[in-house]
Image (spheres, coloured by chain):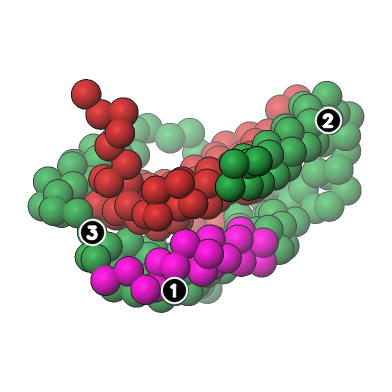
Chain colours: A red, B green
Amino acid sequence: MIAIEYYLVLGAALFAVGVYGVLVRRNAVLILMSIELMLQAVNINLLAFSTYLIPRGDTEQHLGFIFAIFVITIAAAEVGLALGIVLRIYRNRSSVNVDELNRMKW
Amino acid sequence: MTTVLVFFLILAAMTMIGAIGTVTARNVVHAALFLILSLLAVAGLFVLLLAEFLAIVQVLIYGGAITILLLFALMLTRARESTLKLDNNQRVIAFLATGAIFAALTVIFLLSDWPDPIQDPQRPGFTGIAEVLFQQWAIPFEVASLVLLIALIGAIVISRPGPEE
C-alpha cells in the first residue's frame, strides 16, 4: 500500500481543475462536466480514507464506500435534472452560455 | 518503486490529462471524450483502493450513462455550431484562485499527521458492501431511490414543451 498522501494530493489537484472549469467555461454543459470532475475528486478522497484509516472490525466498516455509492447516485440524478434545465433554457433563450443568461441580474 | 506506485502514477497521469483536457479543449466533443478518459482512469484508481464494485459502477454509470447524456445535451443545444469562444475572460484570475485552492489543500494534506495506514486493509468485496448497505444503510438506500424517481419525473416535466410552444 502506498502512502495515503498520494491519493489526497491527486484528489486536491482534480478538484482544483474542476473549480477552474466551473469558473472559466461559458457553456452550461461544460460547467456540468467540470462539476463531475469535482465529484470524482471527492469520491477518491472518501475511498482513500475508508480503505486506509478505518480499522478492521470497526462499526463504521466500509463507510466511505457507502458514501461514494450515494455520491454517484446523486450525481446521476443531478446530471439528468440539470440537462433537462439546460434544454429548457436553450429552447427559451437559444443559448446555453451562462454569461448571456442575465435577465435576473440586477 | 513498488508495482502499486507505478500503476498509481500511470492512472493519476491519465486522470489529470483527461481533467485538464476537459477544461481546456477548444471543441466541446473533445472535452466530453477527455472526460471519459478521466473517469475511466478514476475507475482504475478505485481498483487500487480495493473498491472493485465501485470501479464497475463507475464505468457503467459515468463512462456509459452520464457521458452519453452530456453528449446528447451538446448535440441538442447545437454547441458545436456555436462560433463563440468557450471560455470567458477570467482565465488568469481563475487560474490564480484554483492554484491557491490546490496549494492550500496540498499543504494541509502533507502537514497533517495521519494515523498509520492499516497494514492489511480489509477488501470489502461485493458481499461486504451488500451487507453494510442493506442492513446498516437500508433506509438511506430507499430514500436514494425516491430521489432518483423525483429527479426522473422532474426532468421530464421541465424539458417537456409547454402548451404555448
Drawn side of residue B61 relative to residue B1, left or right: right
Dominant SS type (magenta): helix
Dot 3: chain letter: B
Residue B116 point in image, percent of width and height: 50, 39
Residue at x 44% of width, y 68% of height: B78
> In the image, which disc is placed on residue B59?
none
Mark 2 residue crowding within 10 angstroms, few (<14) / some (14–19) / many (20+): few
Quadrant location, the C terminus of chain A: top left
What kind of residue is marked 3? Asp
Labelled pair 1, 2 in contact (Cβ < 8 Å): no
Of pointers 3 and 2, the one earlier in the residue sequence = 3
Cα separation between marks 3 and 1: 15 Å
- Decide if residue B112 is in sight here: yes
Residue at x 23% of width, y 59% of height: B87
Answer whether residue B72 is magenta in the image.
yes
Mark 1 residue crowding within 10 angstroms, few (<14) / some (14–19) / many (20+): some
Answer whether residue B79 is magenta in the image.
yes
Q: For mark 3, what is the residue?
A: B87
Cα separation between marks 1 and 2: 36 Å
Residue B17 point in image, percent of width and height: 36, 70
